[in-house]
Amino acid sequence: MKNNVKSIGELVKALPPEAQEEVRSLVTVLSRKKIKKMPGKMEFRWAGALKDLRDKYTSVELQHKILEWRIGEK
């Protein structure tokens, strides 16, 4: 029994040049997405950065304060 499924290369070759260029662009975008994955282990250099505020705010109050600061930056 012969397999009638065409390879991606065969399908692309059958397309007109404009469509082949579109496929090329799409493949480029998809390959860049794969490359952008974060390599390695996450670093927590920010840990403890707000420790001077621990006596001033509870953790919940601090979360609300941070949200206010973020909204204010826009």
Image (tube, rainbow, N blue to C red):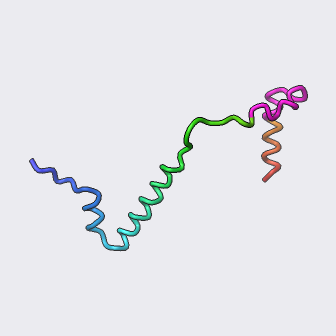
Quarter where residue 8 is shown: bottom left
Quarter where residue 13 is shown: bottom left
Q: Is residue 14 left or right of residue 24?
A: left
21 versus 47 height, above or below: below
Residue at image location 59% in from the left, 35% down from the top: 41
Residue at image location 79% in from the left, 29% down from the top: 60
Residue 57 inside the magenta-drawn segment:
yes
Report the residue that reaches farthest toward the left. Answer: 1
Quarter where residue 39 is shown: top right
| Highlighted magenta segment, given as a residue range | 47-63
Q: Nearer the viewer, residue 44 or 6?
A: 44
The x, y position of residue 6, in whole percent, is: 22, 56
Residue 19 inside the magenta-drawn segment:
no
Residue at image location 78% in from the left, 45% down from the top: 70
50 versus 38 height, above or below: above
The x, y position of residue 35, in whole percent, is: 50, 50
